[in-house]
Image (tube, rainbow, N blue to C red):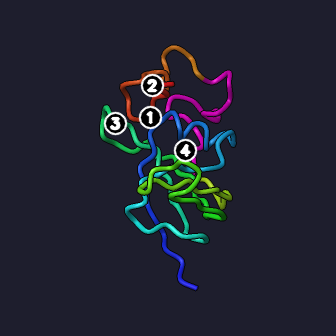
């Protein structure tokens, strides 16, 4: 069985939902021939700065539907099983984990939505 790895840009809001486990699916135009067991490398992308943030979720496709149940023929919905994450573990301005809710102090660049590592949601 052939497994394909797809590296995909993922905008901040849907990436945030993936990162925190609220979203376990991906809706995409199927111009790549996605299949069950393919691996998605979902990289957090900032469209305003056109840069990646450094966070990545790697997931395996365990279910796919296309052209059924009212979906347009060119769109697919993929069920995902997370394999791993690649986070930035610490903020450059502190030694605390950037996901720690107490971390985001006013001076921190992670509060700036215009910075490529900022949180614009």
Q: Are marks 3 and 1 in contact (CB under 8 Å)?
A: no
Give residue 88's mark.
4
Q: Is residue 42 left or right of residue 61?
A: left
Query: Marks 2/1: CA distance?
Result: 7 Å
Q: Quadrant of residue 22?
A: top right
Query: Marks 3/1: CA distance?
Result: 12 Å
Query: Marks 2/3: CA distance?
Result: 18 Å
Quadrant in the picture for the N terminus: bottom right
Mark positioned earlier in the residue sequence (3 or 1): 3
Q: Are marks 4 and 1 in contact (CB under 8 Å)?
A: yes
Mark positioned earlier in the residue sequence (2 or 3): 3
In-front residue for pair 83/99? 83
Query: SS for tag 2?
Result: helix
Give residue 117's mark.
1
Please name the residue that numbered disc 3 is placed on: 47
Residue 110: x and y in percent read 49, 27
Query: SS for tag 4?
Result: loop
Q: Are marks 2 and 1 in contact (CB under 8 Å)?
A: yes
Please name the residue that numbered disc 2 is placed on: 109
């Amino acid at each position: 069985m052939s497994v394909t790895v797809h590296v995909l840009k993922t905008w901040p809001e849907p990436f945030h939902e993936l990162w925190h486990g609220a979203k376990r699916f991906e809706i995409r135009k199927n111009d790549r021939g996605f299949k069950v067991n393919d691996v998605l490398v979902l990289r957090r992308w900032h469209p305003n700065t056109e840069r990646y943030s450094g966070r990545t979720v790697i997931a395996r496709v365990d279910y796919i539907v296309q052209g059924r149940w009212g979906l347009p023929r060119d769109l697919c919905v993929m069920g995902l099983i997370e394999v791993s994450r690649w986070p930035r573990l610490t903020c450059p301005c502190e030694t605390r984990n950037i996901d720690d809710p107490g971390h985001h102090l006013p001076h921190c660049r992670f509060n700036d939505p215009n910075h490529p590592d900022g949180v614009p949601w």
